[in-house]
């Protein structure tokens, strides 16, 4: 599973990356986590607000840090 966290590297983006990694590990998901901070790349994905979360090419969350339960639902 490819998971991408979109954002410039702000506190919320870093928090999301940590929460996503924890949730994926708790679910036992085999994943690759990538942080994308290039705004041009972020906009190519159709995301205009950060942080953003993309799972296997599908945008799952934009503009907020989801709860761990929300993250888990995105990964299942």
Image: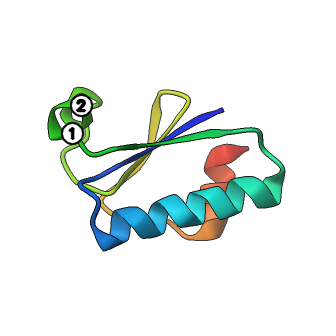
Along the line of sight, the residue nearer the viewer: 33 or 64: 33
Q: Which residue is drawn at 29% across and 59% down?
A: 9
Query: Answer yes or no: do the residues labelled 1 and 2 have beta carbons within 8 Å?
Result: yes
What secondary structure is marked by label 1? loop
Q: Can residue 59 be seen in this view?
A: yes
Q: Residue at x 23, y 26 (%)?
A: 44
Q: Quadrant of residue 47?
A: top left
Q: Can residue 65 be seen in this view?
A: no
Task: Give percent across and percent down for residue 74.
Answer: 61, 48
Q: Quadrant of residue 71?
A: bottom right
Task: Give percent across and percent down for residue 19.
Answer: 57, 66
Give above or below for 66 relative to 41: below
Residue 57 lies left or right of residue 32; in this view the side is left
Residue 45 lies left or right of residue 1; in this view the side is left
Give above or below for 8 relative to 1: below
Q: Mark 1, residues whose alpha carbon is within 10 Å: few (<14), some, or many (≥20)?
A: few
Task: Give percent across and percent down for residue 52.
Answer: 36, 50
Along the line of sight, the residue nearer the viewer: 21 or 66: 21
Q: Which residue is drawn at 15% across and 32% down?
A: 40
Q: Which mark identifies residue 68?
A: none
The outermost residue toward the right is 28
Q: Which residue is under mark 1?
A: 38
What secondary structure is marked by label 2? helix
* CA separation in Å, label 1 and label 2: 5 Å
Quarter of the image with the N terminus in it: top right
Q: Which residue is drawn at 71% across and 53% down?
A: 24
Q: Quadrant of residue 2?
A: top right
Q: Which residue is under mark 2?
A: 41
Quarter of the image with the C terminus in it: top right
């Amino acid at each position: 599973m490819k998971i991408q966290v979109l954002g410039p590297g702000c506190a919320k983006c870093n928090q999301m990356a940590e929460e996503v990694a924890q949730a994926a590990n708790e679910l036992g998901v085999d994943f690759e986590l990538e942080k994308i901070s290039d705004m041009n790349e972020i906009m190519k994905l159709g995301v205009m607000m950060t942080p953003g979360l993309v799972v296997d090419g599908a945008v799952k969350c934009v503009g907020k840090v989801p709860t761990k339960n929300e993250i888990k639902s995105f990964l299942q």
